[in-house]
Amino acid sequence: MNYESNRLRTFEEDWLIRHILPEILARYGFYYTGSRDNVRCHFCSIKLGAWEEGDEVITEHLRWSPYCPLMRKQPTQNVPLDPHFLENVPDPTPDVTSYHGGPYELVSNSTRQYDSVPFCRPEYPEYALESERMSVPDPSPDVTSYQSGHVSNSARQYDSVPFCRPEYPEYALESERKRSLAEWPTAMPQKPQQLSDAGFFYTGRGDQVRCYYCGGGLMHWEPDDDPWEQHAMWYSNCMYVRQMKDRSFIERCLAKKEGRNQKEEDVPKTSTSYVSTASRVAETEASDDKLCKICYEKEYRTALIPCGHVTCVDCSLKFDKCPMCQSPIQNLQKLFL
């Protein structure tokens, strides 16, 4: 899909949206997925759909994926039909350039920015407000439906997270992230297990790592930096963080970053790694009736919306469709059991 002509060819038979021209979509990195009006950018993997009259491809691409290397005029393998096509794309703003750059424009310890990861545009916007209207339900969950691998509306519990796909899906498996960390500098106090657990893979340069989900990068690690804390501090909107950690943890990390919570500064850094270790031990010892119905390795912690099937957090972030019923996934619902 590096060739614009190949991307354009994907629209030939089934594309029916007349107000969004295939020529424009293909020019700016998109190819047709074959589903509804959904297209995906070959260069940043953002998927957009539910196009409306008046939508402009350049505007929507930059709105939902401001760090796309093609749209940010960075070197790519793109082979355009018109070599001057980027003249219509505005130059990236300084904040986007600094914090959502290419593979090695990572955030250092001295320049990390608060909450800089944008949310995806809902692929099925008709479901977007449903999750916002969800209130905390009856505290007694429907245990029977949980054990059958499905969660009913009455059993869904806070917190609902807008659903989008990983920026680097090839690192969605923790084993792949660990493999990338095989060359991680051995002198670094942050170990590969900690980094991969927190969602990071190694870029291959210095101490630079990047989150497979939000694409946020970190480097210039201090000896006492904890990967989970740093991830939550600088990329608190990352859906992987929001699924794996509860709101209180994220708020503590943000308060610590802003210097508003002096007590948190006094908590030994080992406490976070202890919690992570305890969590992994608990997952290992999970009883069969609480195991994820996909991998059968970890406890289910997430319900897929709208079908309600339950999986572990890792599995919930790997699929566009529910593996059990093939329903499109619009939202993820965090479960507290």
Image (cartoon, rainbow, N blue to C red):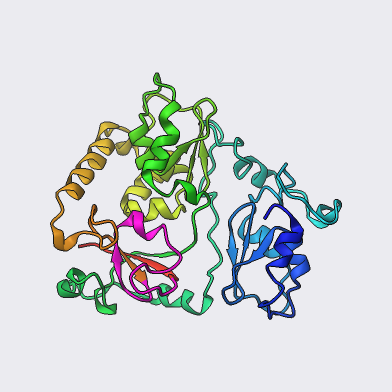
* Picture coordinates of residue 195, whole percent (x, y): 38, 36
From this viewpoint, which residue is outermost toward the top?
A: 187
Q: Magenta stretch: residue 318 in it?
A: yes
Out of 85 and 277, give the one closest to the viewer. 85
Q: Is residue 70 left or right of residue 40?
A: right
Give residue 201's quadrant in the image. top left
The residue shown at (20%, 59%) is 291
Q: Is residue 79 left or right of residue 120?
A: right
Q: Quadrant of the C terminus?
A: bottom left
Q: Above or below — where is 329 with respect to 16?
A: above
Q: Is residue 104 left or right of residue 228?
A: right
Q: Above or below — where is 311 with respect to 38?
A: above
Residue 228 appears in the figure: no
The residue shown at (73%, 54%) is 3
Looking at the rendering, the stretch of residues picked out in magenta corresponds to 305-328
* Picture coordinates of residue 76, whole percent (x, y): 70, 44
Give residue 30's quadrant in the image. bottom right
Out of 323 and 167, give the one closest to the viewer. 323
Out of 234 and 143, give the one closest to the viewer. 143
* Picture coordinates of residue 283, whole percent (x, y): 20, 49
- By secondary structure, the bulk of the magenta-drawn segment is best described as loop
Give residue 301's quadrant in the image. bottom left
